[in-house]
Amino acid sequence: MVVTRFAPSPNGSLHLGHAFSAVTAHDLAKERGGKFLLRIEDIDGERSLADKPDEFREDLAWLGLDWEEVPAQSTRLASYEKVASDLIHRGLLYPCTCTRKDIMALEPRLGPEGAIYPGTCKGRVLDPEKPVALRLDVDRAMAELGELFWEDETNGTQIADPRAFGDVVLVRKDAPASYHLAATLDDAADGVTLVTRGQDLFAMTHIHRVLQELLGLPVPIWHHHPILIGADGEKLAKRRNSPSLADRRKAGEDGLALAEQLRGCEFPAGITLASA
């Protein structure tokens, strides 16, 4: 059975881009007789706002979507800690005290997530007073695994190659897991078979495929849909004050009609789909 999911972070209100992603994931599941899940990704410290999950549920209902809700990330911390401990014992994670400023000072190469970490802390004795993140030793992981593949419904067969990201953080200094680790573990725990998300997250799948193989997790299919961009050519984002679904809902807009417009790729003036 096909299982998709919509997994928002409660650090701000949902906007039209989220609606497009939720409708896409919902419809892919329903068209194939499957399930559409809602998962709240709420481990971002003080940025996770307590009132947002209820707002999200109201937004999805307003759009006419139905879903099954699975446990929020904040209930799964023990699973992240257990996996991180296992990877440490296998020699695949190492601690890092570097800040973004430290990394940028080294004039690093740029990758899909910005500056590529050059491995400064690998093998070093670190200051025990400084907070640490835990990074994946990507070269060691790939040497252990060999060649890997993954399938994307919109982009075809891909060879997994996470080296463009460098040694990524799996456990943050300020959170029990990074997006890479938490989302990968949660998708497996929730039985997600079709990971449906925006094209802007396409490159991250290389990392997630490697984690699945390292941890012996099921391998889903991916579906990366186009993202919505504004008149300025930038993707819609919470931090850029994109109009919220909650505001549209409270203003009396018809959510069912909006969902149908999104299905037909009909967007408000100034909003379009980004080209692949």
Image: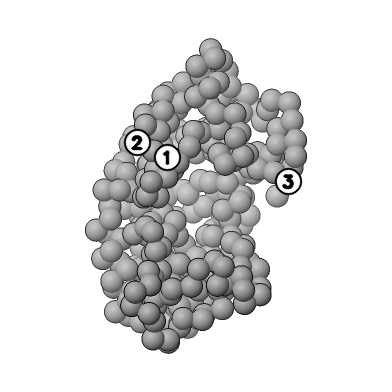
**In the picture provided, is 109 more to the left or to the right than 153?**
right
Q: Given the image, on which type of amino acid does mark 3 rest?
A: Ser
Q: Which residue is mark 3?
A: 275
Quarter of the picture containing the N terminus is top left
Q: Is residue 169 visible?
A: yes
Check disc 2: other Cα within 10 Å, few if <14, some if 14-19, many if 20+. Answer: few
Q: Earlier in the sequence, mark 2 or mark 1?
A: 1
Q: Earlier in the sequence, mark 2 or mark 3?
A: 2
Q: Residue at x 61, y 33 (%)?
A: 242
Query: In the figure, residue 115 lies in which quadrant?
Result: bottom right
Task: Decide: is 264 above or below 171.
Answer: above
x and y percentages locating residue 213 in the rendered image: 41, 69
Q: Which residue is mark 1?
A: 10
Q: Given the image, on which type of amino acid does mark 1 rest?
A: Pro
- Of residues 176 and 179, the one nearer the viewer is 176
Q: Is residue 41 visible?
A: no
Q: Residue at x 65, y 68 (%)?
A: 110
